[in-house]
Amino acid sequence: MARYLTPAKIGLLALIELYVEETVPNDAIIPVLSFLTSHILDSDLQSTMTTTPSAANRWQRAERSIGLVVSIKDFEDLLLPFPAADRLPGRRLWDRFLEKLWGIDSLDALQTFFSRQPRVLARTREELRRMTELGEELPSGILLARNSPLGAFVRKAVLEFTRLQFHHSAELWKAFVKYRQPTVSYWRRRNPQCGRLSFDSVLMESQHEWGSFTDGIAVTAYGGMLMDEEDGALPVSTDDIESLLEFQIDQIQKYGARVPAEIKAKFHAMLRDSHVVPSLSHYLNFSDAWRSGDYPSAFDYLHRYFDYTMQNRDRLFYHYALMNLAIVQSDFGCHKEAMATMLETISTARENKDNTCLNFCLNWFYHFGRAHPDLVQDLEANSMIGSGKEALAFLRAKAKETGMLVLRSSALLSEAKLNMANGESIAGAMEHLVRSSHIIVERNMKSLIGSQLSVTTSLWDRLGISYLSTMTSEVFLRVHAPSACFDDELKMVCRLAGTLAGKGKYDEAFAKLEDGIDKNLLRAAKPNQYWHLYRGLVKLRRDLHHNDLDTAETLLAQLLQIGSEELDPDVVFIIDSLHIEALIRRKDFDAAYEKIERLIAKFRDDHRDLSLRIRLLLVKAHLFDCMGRPERGFSITMRAASLAWRARLLTLLWQAVGALANILNAMGEFTAAVQLVEAVLPRSMESENAFNTGILYSILADARMGQAGKAAKARQAMTTTGETAGAAAAAAASLMNNKKLDLFTKAHEALECAFNHFSAAEDLEKQCETLAKRATLMKVLGDHARAEEYAARYMALKRQSSSGEHSSVWSTDTGTP
């Protein structure tokens, strides 16, 4: 295998020569320069200027590199559409390019080709002075600056050719003949004078002298290539292999995606003929095995790579091996081993004074501690830098000292998340977000945009501004997703799917999960698991709302089998909360109460996110309500409301106020309940959670009914008094009767709104409950026809709920589905 030069690079040199000679027409200059830069500088000028990179074309560079090495067709596709600059009839730029290639008709011509390449470079001052002294004509026209990308490529190619030994030059010549051979039929049609041996001028000129021995000499020199026998060897260099390896590893690390199967097969074909396997290939195999979830293979390839590195570079990279090992162990659920390995990495990096590795490890260890507080509890107690804010402040200061802007921005984002998790100042969290955003935008760190916007959407969600959260997620997916890590893209898509499910748009949520993600990116094990898990959570929520408890329990059994150490803490909490909801719907209150108490104790000990603890308090209050003893949840609800108000968790605050209003209803304080619910209903509707808004409307209807009941008792008392007190008391009783009817009307309107929201959320049980209340209300008002209609709809929904089926639910009083 050649070290640098390949037939494809000879083609690039010929194309540069055409450009310098001004053979390229004006309309072809941009495509030609873009083609050259894409293979020399690893960037595509045309795509950069016109389009935004997408997940689909991230691997185009590898495909282009492999395609150019394997076949000359890429040159043909580029040059054939353009005419030559001389505009001769029927002559294309492709013809001029072939003239260059077929002009190299011997090993001596190849030597001449490389010897004239320095002429395309601009002369140095010393060379210009010498040419002037000798009276030579100074060069004119297009010349390449010696330090320009094209000039540096030409200089390196010439230098590498001069370093080649004779047999390596001969191998390059034979590879070039084979690479050029597919164009022979086109070349002979354009140049009929070219004979069968025109590929080698030595054979062509000597065939009269050698006679019948010419064919034998040709076979001896070129082997089976002249007989169209494929030996499977590709004209690839070590430089091409290493460049492709670095590119693939960079893609895996930057975006978290696996190498596509087609590119992987082509790359292995290129490696097949290599006598020396580059050490980076072991790291590439490790990365691919890691992403695919193959722990034994990942462990084996990691050892292979760093064993090779240790042999050649002593112990300088030992701590990087440990760091990779710790990350792999953590990803595969071996958290205790990962913690021990990372501690050894920190110790080794400190000994070697590698601040970059040390800061990265400390940042990783902080996030690891937030996800698994029980494992690092003893370490944090004995740590000199403390935990939480102190650790982040230390990381931010060290990142600023060492100029690690990525770590500095990440630390600021972590501080913002910590502020929100602890229920601290929203202004402080926003300040950290703005400072992080300033660094990201100023330094154009596109890979951190996903993390930045993810924290921003969490902030909007906590403030109850759902439309801003949705807009931020949509902006990320439409604009920033192609340049961000796939994990960020996946979480944004799942967040949007969860928002749609909260609105009751389950079909749209599933469509977002199915169509919003490139299936090739889901070949990685962790994203694939997360995607299937979230899809299962959306289906579980729908089954619970459809009251299909058997299917829901089957799904729950599968989800609960997944170890909590393998999942994000937020996802674990979602599974636990849905499990509690299923137990409550099954009327298994004892099991639900035990699980709630266990989770509350765990979250209190681990100092988890305040929002999760508030949610558990609200679930506990809801459990008491389902048990028929809502008053027992009064202190719990007041505590949840106080914590939510202090932390500005407004979505949870509206739920807490609704729970408090429900308790006030049970205590007979209907007017206070109405005031509370009417105060929070508009803001709750902004959160776009149909089920929670339906609950508030239902509580409001209960309070209105309670007020109407009190008004009826007061009217009855006044009527009794009116029989003895005269006309004034009778008028007051009539006024109270009108007030009662008005309250009944308002209660019916609230029930209608509640039913519409429950219908949007597709919750059959709550729809049945609302229809039962409406039927009762109509019976009280004496409207037996509508009472019978509501009762019939109630029975239809009950049958649908018991059968586990689901169809369009009733949404208006006209009976239209």
Image (tube, rainbow, N blue to C red):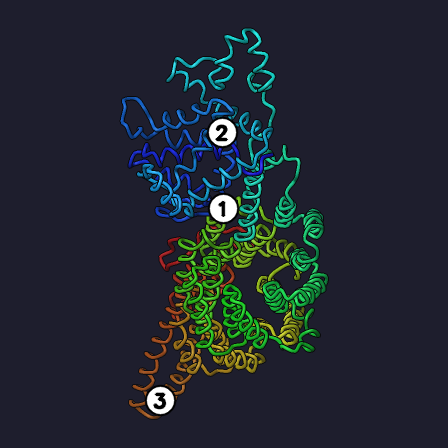
In the rendered image of this protein, does residue 331 appear above or below residue 346? above
**Front in this rendered view, residue 267 or 612:** 267
Residue 365 picture location, percent across and down: 63, 67
Three-letter code for the amino acid on which mark 2 is drawn: Gln
Q: Label 1: which residue?
A: 518
Three-letter code for the amino acid on which mark 3 is drawn: Glu
Instruction: Check the picture and name the quadrant holding the N terminus.
Output: top right
Q: Earlier in the sequence, mark 1 or mark 3?
A: 1
* Farthest-out residue, bottom: 725
In the rendered image of this protein, does residue 632 appear above or below residue 35? below
Q: Residue drawn at (40%, 72%), measured in percent from left and top?
A: 681
Q: Label 1 crowding class (10 Å Cα cut-off): few <14, some 14-19, many 20+? A: few
**Front in this rendered view, residue 462 or 576:** 462
Residue 42 picture location, percent across and down: 46, 45
Disc 1, disc 3: CB below 8 Å?
A: no
Residue 150 picture location, percent across and down: 42, 42
Q: Residue drawn at (48%, 66%), measured in percent from left and top?
A: 455
Residue 723, numbered circle:
3
Q: Is residue 373 visible?
A: yes
Q: Residue drawn at (57%, 48%), measured in percent from left and top?
A: 249
Q: Label 2: which residue?
A: 111
